[in-house]
Amino acid sequence: MSQTDLSRRCAEKWTDQLRLPAEITRGDLAVTLKSAALDGVSRVETYPLNHVKLPRDPRVIRATLAVLMADDDSE
């Protein structure tokens, strides 16, 4: 058996066993804000955009740059 065949068979087995959370299968294929929140994160920004538009939206870019350039006094 070739490496490609083995990889394909493993991928098929894995996807056959994959179970998506109910919030995905019953909704619009997106997770809720609550379940997407990371531990320790106190502020969450939301934008009425799909995932493809997020990296190109000026508001998202400005907000991301502000976080990345902010002074972090916790060090």
Image (cartoon, rainbow, N blue to C red):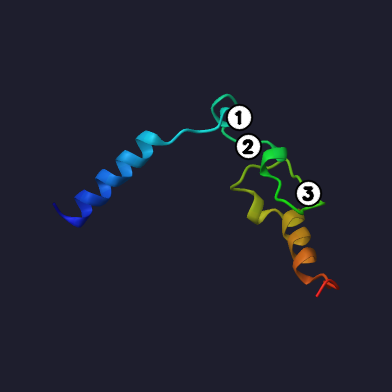
Type of the residue with mark 1: Glu
Type of the residue with mark 2: Val
Q: Residues within 10 Å of mark 2 (few under 14, many from 20)?
A: some
Residue furthest bottom in the image: 75
Q: Who's the residue at 32% across and 45% down the image?
A: 11
Depth check: 53 or 64 in front?
64
Which residue, given by chain and number where applicable, does mark 3 sit on? 44
Q: Position of residue 26 (x, y in %)?
A: 57, 24
Q: Is the residue 73 above or below the residue 26 in the image? A: below
Q: Is the residue 69 above or below the residue 29 in the image? A: below
Mark-to-mark CA distance, 1 and 2: 6 Å
Q: Residues within 10 Å of mark 3 (few under 14, many from 20)?
A: few
Q: Would residue 41 be found to the left or right of residue 29 on screen?
A: right
Q: Quadrant of residue 65?
A: bottom right
Type of the residue with mark 3: Val
Element marked by disc 3: loop
Which residue, given by chain and number where applicable, does mark 2 sit on? 31
Q: Who's the residue at 76% across and 45% down the image?
A: 46
Mark 1–mark 2 CB contact (< 8 Å): yes
Q: Position of residue 57 (x, y in %)?
A: 70, 53
Q: Is the residue 51 above or below the residue 58 in the image? A: above
Q: Position of residue 19 (x, y in %)?
A: 46, 33
Q: Residues within 10 Å of mark 1 (few under 14, many from 20)?
A: few
Mark-to-mark CA distance, 1 and 3: 20 Å
Element marked by disc 1: helix
Which residue, given by chain and number where applicable, does mark 1 sit on? 23
Mark-to-mark CA distance, 3 and 2: 14 Å
Q: Who's the residue at 74% across and 61% down the image?
A: 64
Q: Pick whichever of labels 3 and 2 is earlier in the sequence.
A: 2
Q: Who's the residue at 57% across and 27% down the image?
A: 22
Depth check: 57 or 43 in front?
43
